Image (spheres, rainbow, N blue to C red):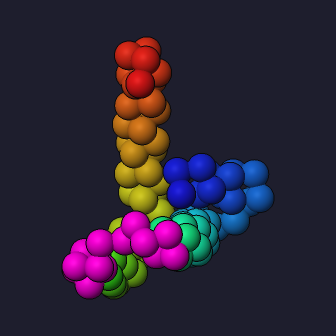
Amino acid sequence: GIVFTPLLHLVLGMDFRRATATSVYLIGVTAASGGLVYLIRGDVVMGSVGPTMLGVLLGATLAARGVHHFSTAWLKRGFTILLIYVAARMLMRGLAGG
């Protein structure tokens, strides 16, 4: 998501809200396929599946309803802050060696 959203918006010229929604969809497809692999391997703790699904559903619902209350400019600012944070964390981990 942190990579797809800027690529879809800046490189492909997609509207920022659509780029964000498409990125979230791609994350969902990736997570579902990865989850299936872990399920088949027997690495899924079944007691955590329900709470995780409820949390994802609640978060997605709130985000879908709430995103319309913010201007695109504010969403871009928030995403920029998130990108800077992720880049700083990656840099610190890289410099620390792990």
Q: Is residue 59 left or right of residue 20?
A: left
Q: Is residue 12 visible in this depiction of the protein?
A: yes
- Of 1 and 29, which appears nearest the observer? 29
Q: Quadrant of residue 97?
A: top left
In the picture as drawn, the residue positioned furthest to the front comes out as 42
Q: Residue at x 46, y 75 (%)?
A: 39
The magenta-colored residue range is: 39-52
Nearest to the observer: residue 2 or residue 36: 36
Q: Give the image location of residue 85, x and y in percent.
A: 37, 37
Residue 70: quarter of image: bottom left
Residue at the location (53% across, 57% down)?
Answer: 1
Magenta residues, dominant SS class: helix
Q: Is residue 71 above or below residue 11?
A: below
Count numbered badges in the picture. 0
Q: Nearer the viewer, residue 74 or 49?
A: 49
- Report if residue 28 is visible in the image: no
Residue 81 in the image: state x and y as whole percent: 38, 42
The answer to if 26 sits in the magenta stretch is: no
User: Quadrant of the image for the C terminus?
Assistant: top left
Q: Is 1 left, or right, of 68 in this rendering?
A: right
- Nearest to the observer: residue 49 or residue 69: 49
Q: Position of residue 33 (x, y in %)?
A: 58, 73
Q: Quadrant of residue 93?
A: top left
| Residue 43 percent coordinates (x, y) | 40, 67
Is 51 inside the magenta-drawn segment?
yes
Up the image or down, 3 lies above or below 8; here it is: above
Q: Residue at x 52, y 76 (%)?
A: 40
* Residue sticking out furthest to the right: 12
Residue 27's place in the image compared with 56, above or below, is above
